[in-house]
């Protein structure tokens, strides 16, 4: 039975709420799928290049620690996001605008960082995403060395992740069009 929108709630045609199985699959894909692993490798390499945390060596074992830390934080972040989202009936997936001016689509990508769809297809604040970011970064401080485990470090990492999410949304919005143009 399709969801019936509440009075005054913005709806989107053909929107189907995320199912529990789709939510689990999305969690697995984000945490351990190719892009999740690629983000882990990139993050570990970036941190190693910057010698962060400085207590970890800049060799293969240090890379492994950085990669494991990033993957652990990612799994916690996505797990909390999915759990809170399940309780709030939100949909964490990104939905491309796909049409309109470049400025309108850019705005859509930016707004979609802090707004998700509700069970009716309308918009709501991305409380689950914020909860996941904060939880993942606060919990990560429990295994990070002293140079990286303060509350301000967790806040800095959370803000940085919001910035990366903006970039990733922009990529998801425009990459299909760029790819199509490259083929022709």
Image (tube, rainbow, N blue to C red):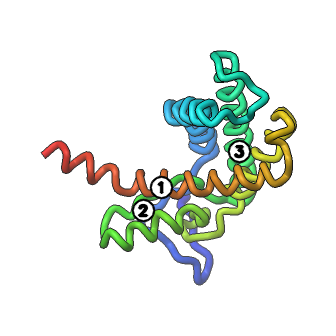
Decide which of tag 3 and tag 2 comes sooner along the chain.
Answer: 2
In the depicted view, which residue is nearer to us: 71 or 82?
A: 71
State the CA–CA distance, disc 3 to disc 1. 17 Å
90 lies left or right of 146: left
In the depicted view, which residue is nearer to us: 29 or 25?
A: 29
Where residue 66 sits in the image (x, y, percent)?
68, 29
Where residue 129 sits in the image (x, y, percent)?
67, 55
Q: Which residue corresponds to mark 1?
A: 169
Decide which of tag 2 and tag 1 comes sooner along the chain.
Answer: 2
Q: Secondary structure at mark 1?
A: helix
Check the picture and name the quadrant holding the N terminus: bottom right
Decide which of tag 3 and tag 1 comes sooner along the chain.
Answer: 3
Q: Which residue corresponds to mark 2?
A: 14
Q: Quadrant of residue 79?
A: top right
Q: Is residue 80 visible?
A: yes
Q: Which residue corresponds to mark 3?
A: 77
Does the residue at mark 2 contact the one at mark 1 (Cβ under 8 Å)? no
Where residue 144 sits in the image (x, y, percent)?
81, 35
């Amino acid at each position: 039975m399709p969801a019936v929108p509440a009075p005054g709630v913005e709806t989107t045609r053909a929107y189907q709420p995320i199912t529990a199985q789709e939510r689990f699959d999305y969690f697995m894909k984000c945490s351990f799928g190719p892009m999740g692993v690629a983000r882990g490798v990139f993050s570990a390499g970036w941190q190693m290049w910057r010698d962060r945390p400085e207590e970890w060596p800049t060799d293969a074992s240090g890379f492994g620690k950085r990669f494991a830390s990033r993957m652990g934080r990612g799994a916690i972040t996505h797990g909390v996001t999915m759990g809170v989202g399940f309780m709030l009936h939100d949909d964490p997936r990104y939905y491309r605008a796909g049409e309109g001016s470049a400025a309108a689509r850019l705005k859509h990508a930016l707004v979609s960082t802090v707004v998700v769809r509700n069970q009716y297809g309308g918009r709501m604040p991305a409380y689950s995403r914020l909860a996941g970011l904060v939880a993942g970064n606060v919990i990560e401080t429990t295994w990070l060395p002293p140079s990286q485990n303060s509350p301000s470090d967790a806040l800095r990492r959370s803000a940085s992740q919001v910035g990366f999410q903006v970039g990733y949304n922009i990529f998801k919005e425009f990459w299909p069009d760029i790819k199509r143009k490259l083929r022709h």
